[in-house]
Image (spheres, rainbow, N blue to C red):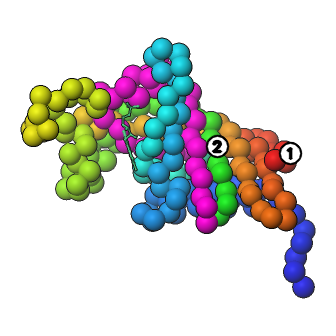
Amino acid sequence: MKNTSPPATDDIRQRIWTELQRATVDRHHEWRTPVLATTGLDGLAQARTVVLRAANASTSQLVFFTDSRSPKASELHATPAAAFVFWSKRLNWQLRARVLTKLHSKGDMVESAWERIRQSPAAGDYLAPGPPGSALASCADVATAAHHLAVVVAQVESIDWLELAPEGHRRARLSASTQEWLVP
Ligand SMILES: Cc1cc2nc3c(=O)[nH]c(=O)nc-3n(C[C@H](O)[C@H](O)[C@H](O)COP(=O)(O)O)c2cc1C
């Protein structure tokens, strides 16, 4: 017989972190490329796509890489609070995660991330001659010798999970110590 009892929010929490972790190793996972929303230096909203590099359920942390000279790096320095939005058509799940970020541009964490990335095509992203978004004299401008990789660790403060389903949508808000069902 089909079990129709509603799942506990604890089960949802576990499934969410399982999917987030999968997204860091599966190139085809839709949650690999969330949108990161920040507060611009002008006080207005900013958003862009990033690649999810790590997800740690036990510490509730998400990690992405960026160029330490990028506008988003300055924005996160000024306002560490940010939000991720993930959508998966396969799961029919939207995840909105409110986070507090810390940007690391030097130290062991950055150097070990650079060791992993330096042989990959993505290395060029962190060797650009100027900050992302700055003008290029020509599109053949050469890369710099030193990398500008920054590792951003985002501490998840709360998660808003929405599941779309024909038999009824479901929504839950999860924080470290609380969990509640919401009207979708
Ligand atoms: C699929 C995809 C993945 C991306 N991944 C990253 C990333 O992991 N880190 C990053 O800094 N920018 C990434 N970008 C580029 C950003 O979306 C953005 O264009 C760039 O970082 C400049 O953003 P900013 O001006 O807000 O700093 C990605 C773009 C796409 C389309």
Q: Which mark is residue 96?
A: 2
Structural distance between the alpha carbons of marks 2 and 1: 15 Å
Residue 30 in the magenta stretch? The answer is no
The reply to whether discs 2 and 1 touch (Cβ–Cβ < 8 Å) is no
Q: Determine the secondary structure under disc 1.
A: loop
Q: Residue at x 52, y 52 (%)?
A: 55
In the rendered image, residue 26, in percent from the top left (x then y), is placed at 45, 65
Amino acid at the residue labelled 1: Val
In the rendered image, residue 82, in percent from the top left (x then y), is placed at 55, 31
Q: Residues within 10 Å of mark 2 (few under 14, many from 20)?
A: many
Q: Determine the secondary structure under disc 2.
A: strand
Amino acid at the residue labelled 2: Arg
Q: Which residues are magenta?
A: 61-90
Q: Residue at x 71, y 44 (%)?
A: 160
> Which residue was labeled with disc 1?
183
Ligand 1 image position (quadrant): top left
Q: Which mark is residue 134?
A: none
Residue 87 in the magenta stretch? The answer is yes
Residue 17 position by quadrant: bottom right
Side (left or right) of 57 relative to 103: right
One can see residue 124 in this view: yes
